[in-house]
Amino acid sequence: MRNETVVTEFILEGFSGLNQRLQLFLSLVFLLIYLTTVMGNATIIFLVCVDNRLQIPMYFFIGNLAFLEICFTSCTSIKLLVILSSGRRTISVSACFVQSYFYFALGCTELILLVVMSFDRYLAICQPLHYAAIMTQQLCMLLVVAAWVAGFTFMSYHLVLLSKLTFCGSNKIQHFFCDNSPLFQLSCSDTNLLWRIGSVLILFILLGSLCLTLSSYVCILFCILRMPSRRKKAFATCSSHLTSLAIAFGSCLDLYSHPSERVSLETNKLVALLNTVLYPFLNPFIYSLRNKLVVLVLKDAIAHATAQLFPQSRCISGQ
């Protein structure tokens, strides 16, 4: 038996190949994107909670998606910002496993929630007369709770797989967070069976949610083809939603549909940026801030806040 040193912490290499100035510049860019993402999604949550005009199932699901996006991007972006700005790259094994679990659990929850949202849009467009009777407040709450419970339950196996890995050699992870591929490549145990089990379950969730989501949008497409008056607006809405879905599902399939030994970690990092940084950043604009009602509610909220902060200017304008 050879002597082996048990790894107790990892070093996230991130983008260590870049010079320090470029890393600082990227940290500022990613910080701006992260703050915009959090503020945009937090604004949506606030508007959905306080304005009665948004108290309908569609915006209830969008509000939950916004909260989910804040959690999902924070899971990886905060550590990325620390790595780029300060150079502190170490992370304990337990913290690495926790980060990996929450990344996959939140991602799985989001995929299930996207299925629920597509079904909601199908009922609203294709079954408008039955929509209010079907999508009750109780059912909406049940669907959201089921999405969260299912996402975190399905991904509990991920912690089991990680617990089977042993690390006794290098502790340098060629990534900016604890993703599957670099962890499996770094492990000194036999990972073939574990990788296959993990890949099958991830692809089952990915492809299952993709098929269900696309089936709803295909039904919507056939419905709007029979509604010439609403065709243009419906096509514009569906095209933006499908663009968002293409980024989410496309990046996930590219990341997790290949064997670990065939994965290029440099390409993996760039694709992961689409999934963890760009997609959460675009979602508030795609699902909400392009919506006329949401924009109107936001303007009313800003006007009300301005009137409360500067009451004298309102009196002067009235005179």
Image (cartoon, rainbow, N blue to C red):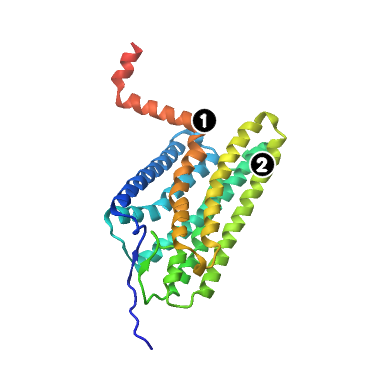
Nearer to me, 293 or 270: 270
Q: Which of the image's four quarters has the N terminus?
A: bottom left
The image shows residue 21, relative to residue 14, as above or below, that is: above
Please give left or right for residue 313 compared with residue 256 in the image: left
Which of the numbered marks, if any, corresponds to residue 132? none
Q: Residues within 10 Å of mark 1 (few under 14, many from 20)?
A: few
Q: Residue at x 55, y 70 (%)?
A: 197
Give coordinates of residue 237: x percent, y percent: 58, 37
| Residue 255 position within the rendered picture, expressed as x and y whole percent measured from the top left | 51, 59
Q: Nearer the viewer, residue 243 or 71?
A: 243
Which residue is at the far right?
Answer: 226
User: What residue did someone put label 1 on?
Assistant: 292
Q: Dot 2 corresponds to which residue?
A: 220
Q: Confirm or deny contact between disc 1 and disc 2 (CB under 8 A).
A: no
Corner quadrant of residue 87: bottom left
Residue 232 or 262: which is nearer the viewer?
262
The residue that appears at 41% across and 44% down in the rendered structure is: 37
Q: Amino acid at mark 1?
A: Lys
Q: Estimate how packed mark 2 is, as few (under 14), some (14 to 19) or many (20 or more) residues with alpha carbons within 10 Å.
A: many
Q: Residue lying furthest bottom in this view?
A: 1
- Residue at 37% x, 47% y is 30
Percent of width and height locating residue 54? 50, 35
224 left or right, relative to 300: right
Compare marks 1 and 2 and give the one earlier in the sequence.
2
Instruction: Specify the amino acid type for callout 2.
Output: Ile
